Image (cartoon, rainbow, N blue to C red):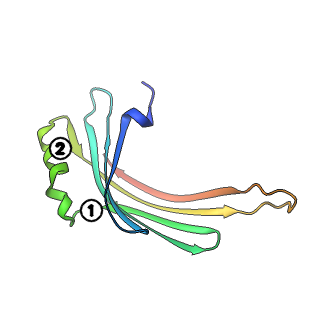
């Protein structure tokens, strides 16, 4: 069974408190016999310097949205379980060693904890 991000994952931004902070709902469909998962998360990011960005994602357990439509939808669908997703990403632009090229690459350092 191949993974297809467009059809297997639904992501909806619920609120964007600022350019650096948002609340989102994500649902992941799994093949049988596994149960589907949904996640209600907050994501914040900060530019640490000209070449580095820190992105943190964590469960939104205190939000007004936690017991809203999204939670009710999960309770109606017996095949969906609320999951937990926490991650820390550090995205660092690596400058080219050769100054004659303009191509850059990005180093991704991260920690991700999923409770499915």
Q: How many marks?
A: 2
Quarter-of-image position of residue 37: top left
Image quarter (top left, top right, bottom left or bottom right) of the N terminus: top left
Q: Which residue is farthest bottom?
A: 49
x%, y% of residue 27?
A: 30, 43
Asked if the residue under mark 2 is in contact with the one under mark 1, i.e. CB atoms within 8 Å, the reply is no
Mark 1 Cα within 10 Å, few/some/many (few <14, many 20+)?
Answer: some
Residue at image location 28% in from the left, 32% down from the top: 34
x%, y% of residue 32?
A: 28, 26
81 w.r.t. 63: above or below:
above
Report helix, strand or loop for mark 2.
helix
The residue beneath circle 1 is: 60
x%, y% of residue 64?
A: 18, 64
Residue at image location 43% in from the left, 64% down from the top: 56
Mark 1 / mark 2, whichever is N-terminal = 1
Quarter-of-image position of residue 41: bottom left
Tag shown at residue 74: 2
Mark 2 Cα within 10 Å, few/some/many (few <14, many 20+)?
Answer: some
Residue at image location 27% in from the left, 37% down from the top: 36
Viewer-proximal residue among 104 and 87: 104
Tag shown at residue 41: none
Residue at image location 16% in from the left, 43% down from the top: 73
């Amino acid at each position: 069974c191949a993974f297809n991000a467009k059809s297997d994952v639904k992501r909806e931004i619920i609120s964007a408190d600022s350019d650096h902070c948002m609340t989102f709902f994500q649902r992941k469909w799994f093949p049988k016999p596994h149960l589907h998962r949904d996640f209600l998360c907050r994501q914040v990011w900060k530019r640490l310097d000209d070449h580095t960005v820190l992105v943190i994602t964590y469960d939104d357990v205190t939000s007004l949205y936690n017991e809203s439509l999204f939670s009710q939808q999960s309770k109606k669908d017996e095949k969906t379980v609320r999951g937990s997703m926490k991650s820390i990403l550090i995205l660092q632009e690596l400058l080219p060693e050769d100054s004659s090229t303009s191509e850059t690459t990005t180093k991704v350092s991260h920690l991700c904890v999923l409770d499915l």
